[in-house]
Image (cartoon, grey):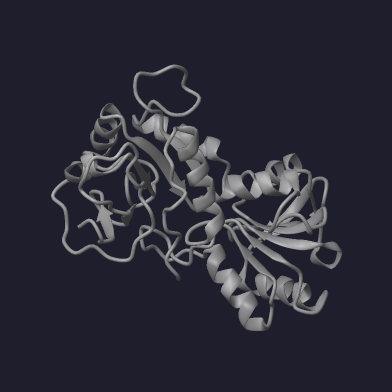
Amino acid sequence: VSDGVYMVSLVAACGLLLQPTARRPSPLRRFLSPVLEAPAPLASLLDLADEYDAFLLDQFGVIHDGKTAYEGAVDAVCELQRRGKKIVIISNSSRRKSDTLARLRSMGFGPCEGDGASDVPPISVVTSGDLVWEGLSAAAAAPFADLGLRCTVFGNGEDDEEYVRTCGRVAVPVAEADFVLARGLFTILGTGPDLLRQPFSPYSADAEEEALRAALAARPGGLPLVVANPDTVRPDGKDSPMPGLLAARYEAMGATDIRPVGKPHPLIYEACRAQLAIAGIDAAGARGAPPG
């Protein structure tokens, strides 16, 4: 397996992302990296524990279902930590990472970053939503540096106003927007009847099409679309609108400036490498994400 690439399912579903290394002593083995296929299923994730210094784990559909941890998942992750392995949760959640940390703690995972001193490496979290928030706040690097202050937001209907306000942006109708932000498909922030008292309107397919066509007409190639969750399907397989599908529809209309943040795109893996570097793990040579 020294030259192979693995995708390992934990309990139920999606992959743990691994890049194997040669079976010889090394001060720092390669960390988990995105993969395409597994040659054979594993009886236990712990079978690989001694081959790696760190594990990147997705959350939804891998270690929990959104509300409850899968059977054995807490014990497995805790055992990896006990063995000194660095755990990084890598998620396409469009929310800040504090939401994921709170969710993990409530399910019994931990210790996590911010929990204080510990004898084991704490769980770190990288979410696409946090990367977008940080990028918009700093406005210092691609793909965020050239965006304006005004945006129309396809949102989750819960924390969108706070999210936009605290990263220094203002929600406005599409006709006044500098860019479009896609976090969810439950409401459209900036299109409500009163931008102070009711700044959002309910999402619908017709409202989406109207907003996207207006964004497309605003400039050649359309307004930039920042996608804080590029997923096109839910991990549980349920039929639910996803921001990645909105991006695909916008592109099909002729839009050319679409900026996805999250798996399988590079920025989120760069953030994971940074977390591993903080833990003293050199992941500079790890491979990037697979296409698609």
**Left or right of 287: which side holds 181?**
right
Circle count: 0
Q: Is residue 111 above or below residue 1?
A: above
- On the picture, is 238 further left or further right than 215? left
Name the residue nearer the viewer: 203 or 282: 282
Residue 162: which quarter of the image?
Answer: top right
Q: Is residue 191 visible?
A: no
Looking at the image, the residue that sits furthest to the left is 43
Q: Residue at x 41, y 28 (%)?
A: 122
Is residue 15 shown left or right of residue 165? left
Q: Assign the N terminus to one quadrant of the image.
A: bottom left
The residue sitting at 50% across, 33% down in the picture is 278
Q: Is residue 236 above or below residue 251?
A: above
Q: Position of residue 92 (x, y in %)?
A: 49, 53
What residue occupies the far top of the structure in this picture? Answer: 117
Which residue is nearer to you in this view: 36 or 245?
36
x and y, in percent, of residue 272 in the image: 48, 45
Q: Is residue 62 above or below residue 223?
A: above
Question: Residue 241 placed where, x, y %?
Answer: 52, 65
Which quarter of the image is occupied by the C terminus?
Answer: bottom left
- Can residue 39 be seen here? The reply is yes
Residue farthest to the right, as pictured: 176
Q: Name the quadrant containing residue 172.
A: bottom right
Residue ID at (53%, 56%): 262
Q: Position of residue 45 (x, y in %)?
A: 21, 45
